[in-house]
Amino acid sequence: MTLLPSNLELRLDYRDYHRRFRSPLVTAHGEWQERDGVIVRLEAPDGRVGYGEAAPIAWFCPEIRTKPTTGAPLSEQMCLPAFGSTFRPLTINGVEDPDLHWALECALAQLNDPTLPGVRVPIAGLLPAGMAALAALPGQLASARRALKWKIGVLRCSEEIALADHIAQSLPRGVRLRLDANGGLTKADYAAWLTWCQERRDVIDYLEQPLPIGEEAAMFALAEGTGVPIALDESIARVDMVILLAKRFPTAVLIIKPSLLGSRSAYLRWRSANYQHRVVYSTSFETAIGLKAVWELAALDWPPLSPAGLDAASIMEDDGLCPMRIGWEICHTDWPQSVDEEVWKRL
Ligand SMILES: [Mg+2]
């Protein structure tokens, strides 16, 4: 492996994409039907190629530009055309857009060392919100996954708790339930969920982002003494918030969506010094290019303590941009060498 000289001139290309969910993703923020993203490609003079993906989620980061507000392609909103057709590794320090920063840093990391960690990462399942969870449950249980996530804050609280009872009773021993409110609960509903989770500590893995961004102190104050693990997701999208809130709330489970972190290297630096925090890696519904980078970060965290939320393939339309069958684990041999190029050619 030869590291790239910091001023080496790399050829920069990029392509926008639009992908549709199989059925709209229902969360406490409403329905999400289509995701926009950008794939970047860097090519070294010796022919080595690195790919990266920018895959923002609007409700996680208020500063994120979303297409409906400007009408411009995401690559333009990220000011990618201003870079022209060349990019030098040292330029990465000046890339201010966090999603673009992540994408370019992934492409540079791949150019420097394309070797994937030789480990297996266990994968969690995703149940659809509301009543649809019951129909999806048998299929998820048959997949041998050890953790299932269910979105809450979508129906009336009492209705959802009755459904949660049903789901909890159906889980085989050893399968854990993760409840994700996407910041959409009232304090009264949060209290009701805490009481229920306390009674079902045998199956509850954690209660995720019960209250909106900014209400972290209330989240942990209300949960104090209940023994219910609370996870932060929307609150810690960017790496600076991971660092800040992990310090403030040392018991928090940290849901890391690598595509939203901004700086890959800053995260890896923090993680190596803070390995005691429980983290769970999660997809932002990327193509195979972005998903591989997310998987790689989870694999570098070996031994992973928690199944990762990486099942992006089954909930997006089959558009060939994530040609993977995702089972109960993903290992390095599940990524064909040509997968990045195949995705690129389809755009
Ligand atoms: Mg979440």
Image: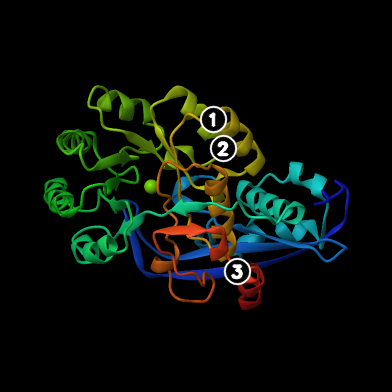
**Residue occupied by mark 2:** 239
- Sort mark 2 into few (<14), some (14-19) or many (20+) by Cα contacts within 10 Å: many
Amino acid on which disc 2 is placed: Val
Q: In the structure shown, which secondary structural element does the residue marked by tag 3 occupy? A: loop
Residue at the outermost front position: 118
Contact between marks 1 and 2 (CB within 8 A): the answer is yes
Give residue 262's quadrant in the image: top right
Amino acid on which disc 1 is placed: Ile
- Sort mark 1 into few (<14), some (14-19) or many (20+) by Cα contacts within 10 Å: some
Q: In the structure shown, which secondary structural element does the residue marked by tag 1 occupy? A: helix
- Image quarter hosting the C terminus: bottom right
- Sort mark 3 into few (<14), some (14-19) or many (20+) by Cα contacts within 10 Å: few
Residue 197 point in image, percent of width and height: 20, 37
312 sits left or right of 346 in the view: left
Q: In the structure shown, which secondary structural element does the residue marked by tag 2 occupy? A: helix
3D distance between C-alphas at marks 1 and 3: 34 Å
Q: Residue at x 17, y 49 (%)?
A: 168
Residue 145 point in image, percent of width and height: 33, 56
| Looking at the image, residue 169 lies above or below residue 138 | above
Whether residue 49 appears in this view of the structure is yes
Upstream in the sequence, badge 3 or badge 2? 2
Give residue 230's quadrant in the image: top left
The circle drawn on residue 243 is: 1
3D distance between C-alphas at marks 1 and 2: 6 Å
